[in-house]
Image: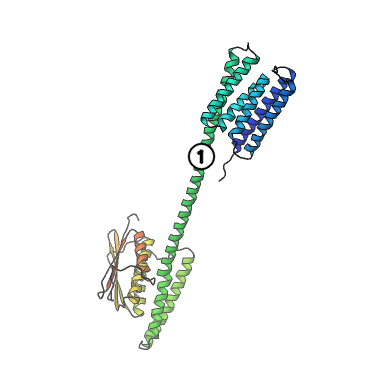
């Protein structure tokens, strides 16, 4: 970000105008005789004033172009001013601008010495050309030079504070932009994970069920009536997947279950699994209670994922789904008699399988619940999900 130098430009132009005005006043006083000329006459005073002004313009051009102004320029300008003051006291008021320039462009030790020299020259020139000027003619230049140095110092500090503020604003804007970018990235990752979970648990599970049903229907050992049922179920599953996909594209999160529709959805999932060749039963216990939509959706996805794992990975023959309603919480258990697995192994294998376990845990945790998996090789698998009702998520 580029710093706004408009305030500095105004101050510099004000200094330029003041210097030229004071130089013009000195020339006028020398020409009309209001200020005595020590030697050389009016032409010498005018020529000296023009030389000093020309040298000042050299530094002014450097300031306008944002170039560094060397200390030699200020010292040379001060020396020229001293010569002018010796010629005519009308140029003594240029000391005010010189005091500001010396304090701005010289380092502290040199600037202090320069201020003392300027004050001494101003007082000496006044006393030299006007011996009876009085105490005010001595104190006035000193106070003016001290005031000029003080104003320049204050302005420098204020300018430095403004620069620090601008840098701080730039840092704050950069930090805000980085945070916003991180939030956007986090939102993208969260949405990507949600989409992946919805596709895996919705359309992906339906496609897996269709594959199992069609494979069973193509098996020559399957009875003809059973084949018709399996093909019909596969078609129904495909239609359901299509409906869910359309609903998902409209922005809804998965199947839109009625408040009491979880039991029906679990019973339907059990019936489809049975048709595909894996005997599955569903039972419910306790007094049914109204469940939040997110809880119904999460428990249905857990059951679907557990059934898919039992069919594809566990090679199970029987599965039991149990939905238990208790005061303040609901439990879902999916137990199979498959080959089981080592629960200490990584949840996601190198081929990408195992994402469903991670997704089911995430879904239930978002509802404030927990998921536990009990299994060991050769002894089946039990997936247990517990979700509290009426507690903050």
State which quarter of the image contains the C terminus. bottom left
Residue at the far front in the pictured view: 40
Asked whether 113 or 203 is in front, the reply is 113
Q: Residue visible at 32% across and 62% down? A: 289
Circle 1 residues within 10 Å: few <14, some 14–19, many ≥20: few
Visible residue check, residue 233: no
Q: Residue 198: horizontal and vertical position, in percent? A: 42, 66
- Residue 225 picture quarter: bottom left
Residue at the far top in the pictured view: 132
Q: Is residue 175 above or below residue 38?
A: below
Asked whether 342 or 386 is in front, the reply is 342
- Residue 5 picture quarter: top right
Q: Residue visible at 59% across and 20% down? A: 141
Q: Mark 1 = which residue?
A: 165
Asked whether 172 or 146 is in front, the reply is 146
Q: Residue 307: horizontal and vertical position, in percent? A: 34, 73
Visible residue check, residue 206: yes
Asked whether 322 or 65 is in front, the reply is 65
Count the marks: 1
Relative horizontal placement of residue 365, taking residue 7 as reference (left or right): left
Q: Residue 351: horizontal and vertical position, in percent? A: 39, 72
Q: Residue 292: horizontal and vertical position, in percent? A: 37, 60
Q: Residue visible at 47% across and 67% down? A: 247
What's the coloring here? Answer: rainbow
Mark 1, secondary structure of its residue:
helix
């Amino acid at each position: 970000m580029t710093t706004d130098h408009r305030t500095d430009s105004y101050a510099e132009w004000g200094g330029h105008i003041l210097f030229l005005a004071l130089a013009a006043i000195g020339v006028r006083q020398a020409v009309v005789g209001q200020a005595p000329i020590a030697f050389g006459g009016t032409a010498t005073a005018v020529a000296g004033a023009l030389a000093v002004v020309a040298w000042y313009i050299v530094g002014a051009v450097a300031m306008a172009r944002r170039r560094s102004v060397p200390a030699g320029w200020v010292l040379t300008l001060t020396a020229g001013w001293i010569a002018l003051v010796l010629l005519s006291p009308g140029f003594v008021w240029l000391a005010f601008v010189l005091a500001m320039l010396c304090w701005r462009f010289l380092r502290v030790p040199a600037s202090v010495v320069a201020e003392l020299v300027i004050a001494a020259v101003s007082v000496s020139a006044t006393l030299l050309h006007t011996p009876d000027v009085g105490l005010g003619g001595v104190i006035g230049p000193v106070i003016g030079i001290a005031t000029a140095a003080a104003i320049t110092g204050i302005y420098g500090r204020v300018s430095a504070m403004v620069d620090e503020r601008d840098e701080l604003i730039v840092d704050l804007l950069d930090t805000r932009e980085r945070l916003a970018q991180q939030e956007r990235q986090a939102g993208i990752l969260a949405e990507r994970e949600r989409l992946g979970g919805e596709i895996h648990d919705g359309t992906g599970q339906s496609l897996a069920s269709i594959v199992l049903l069609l494979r069973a229907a193509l098996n020559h050992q399957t009875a003809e009536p059973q084949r018709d049922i399996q093909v019909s179920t596969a078609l129904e599953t495909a239609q359901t997947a299509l409906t869910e996909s359309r609903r998902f594209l409209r922005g809804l999160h998965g199947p839109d279950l009625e408040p009491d529709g979880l039991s029906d959805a679990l019973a339907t999932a059990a019936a489809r699994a049975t048709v595909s060749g894996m005997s599955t039963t569903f039972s419910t216990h306790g007094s049914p209670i109204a469940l939040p939509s997110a809880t119904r959706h999460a428990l249905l996805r857990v059951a679907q994922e557990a059934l898919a794992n039992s069919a594809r990975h566990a090679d199970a023959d029987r599965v039991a789904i149990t939905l238990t309603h208790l005061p303040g919480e609901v439990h879902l258990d999916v137990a199979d008699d498959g080959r089981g697995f080592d629960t200490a192994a990584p949840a996601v294998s190198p081929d990408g399988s195992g994402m469903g376990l991670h997704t089911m845990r995430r879904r239930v945790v978002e509802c404030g619940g927990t998921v536990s998996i009990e299994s060991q090789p050769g002894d089946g698998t039990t997936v247990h999900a517990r979700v509290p009702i009426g507690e903050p998520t």
